[in-house]
Amino acid sequence: MTASLVLVATPIGNLGDLSPRAVEALAGADLICCEDTRRTGRLLAHAGVGRGAAGRPRLRRLDEHTEAAAIPEILELLEAGAAVALVSDAGMPALNDPGARLVAATAEAGHAVTVVPGPSAGSAALAVSGLAADRHCFEGFLPRRGEARAGRLAEIAAHECTTVIYESPHRLAACLQDLADACGAQRRAVVARELTKLHEEIVRGRLGELRDWAAAGVKGEAVIVLEGAPARHGAVADADTGADVERLRGDVERLVSTGVTRRDAVAAVAVENRVPRRWLYNTVLRSNDRR
Ligand code: SAM
């Protein structure tokens, strides 16, 4: 291996997913940067990558707190001709994991950066979801709270392409609840849970159903894959919103007749047609009163 930084994808659960090229890259590295030296040590032991008397490859912790401080040292090693590998705890490093700053600094310094692709939870979940995948938006983790979260949810509700969202196990139910509120309970989504592990589960449904399923408590790592908002149509009628009130009212009533609550039906139709939810609610009630 010549002086370069190589990003190596590692399993997201099933150790059998560690590729021969990944083992080769790890075995050939002088230094492996990793989030957790014990965890990566176990992976190396599993892969039969010996860490002989010379201590090669050496492990160095690189996480979100230590990344900035580690960069000068790693650049010096690369300057001296070392082969450096970067892994994270699971999946592709630098994707919602540490590493992006190191990659940028290494490239900026003129050293080669290469990649050994492999498992990544987001792309695995997207592929297995069956939702449209040609255009998709990879959101990673949503902001935890406040205006940042509300704003992101509103943006996501309007995305016409499929959205991929990471979530931690104990926040999954709350995330599905927020998505149902923002996108309407009728929007389709898929939760891909414990991918490649013994209890792998792919749950497909409407956001309202998934919200109810998760409310009982769901364990394990999960990715939410959300169907995109329907493409905007050009109907025009209402002076304030440009919306075709009668068509929207009809859409709401059709959903209500299938058992959806009026609140959820209004939310779904509002998002689909990009009209304010409160305006639609009042408009539908008004036009029902007139009948
Ligand atoms: N860089 C990683 C990758 O490429 O897969 C992602 C790291 S991110 C910190 C961790 C998130 O990935 C989890 O919160 C979960 O959303 C998702 N994840 C990781 N492993 C998973 C698995 N086996 N099944 C489902 N989701 C998983």
Image (cartoon, rainbow, N blue to C red):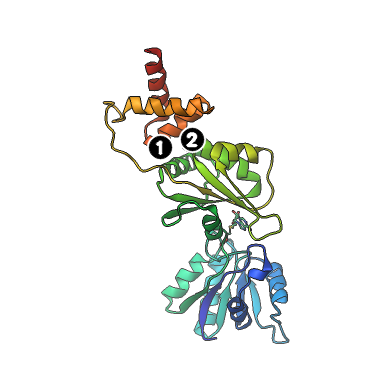
x and y percentages locating residue 121 in the rendered image: 57, 59
Front residue of 279 and 247: 247
x and y percentages locating residue 148 in the rendered image: 48, 43
Front residue of 266 and 45: 266
Residue 178, placed above or below residue 202: above
N-terminal label among 1 and 2:
2
Contact between marks 1 and 2 (CB within 8 A): the answer is yes
- Name the disc covering residue 272, or none: 1
Residue 129, placed above or below residue 181: below
> What residue do we see at 63% from left, 57% from top?
195
Local crowd at mark 1 within 10 Å, few (<14), some, or many (≥20)? many
Left or right of 246, for residue 119: right
The amino acid type, in three-letter code, at marker 1 is Glu
x and y percentages locating residue 197 in the rendered image: 68, 59
Give the CA separation, mark 1 to mark 2: 9 Å
Residue tagged 2: 184
- Image quarter where the N terminus lies is bottom right
- Label 1, secondary structure: give it: helix
> What residue do we see at 70% from left, 54% from top?
199
**Which residue extends farthest top?**
290
Residue 30, placed above or below residue 7: below
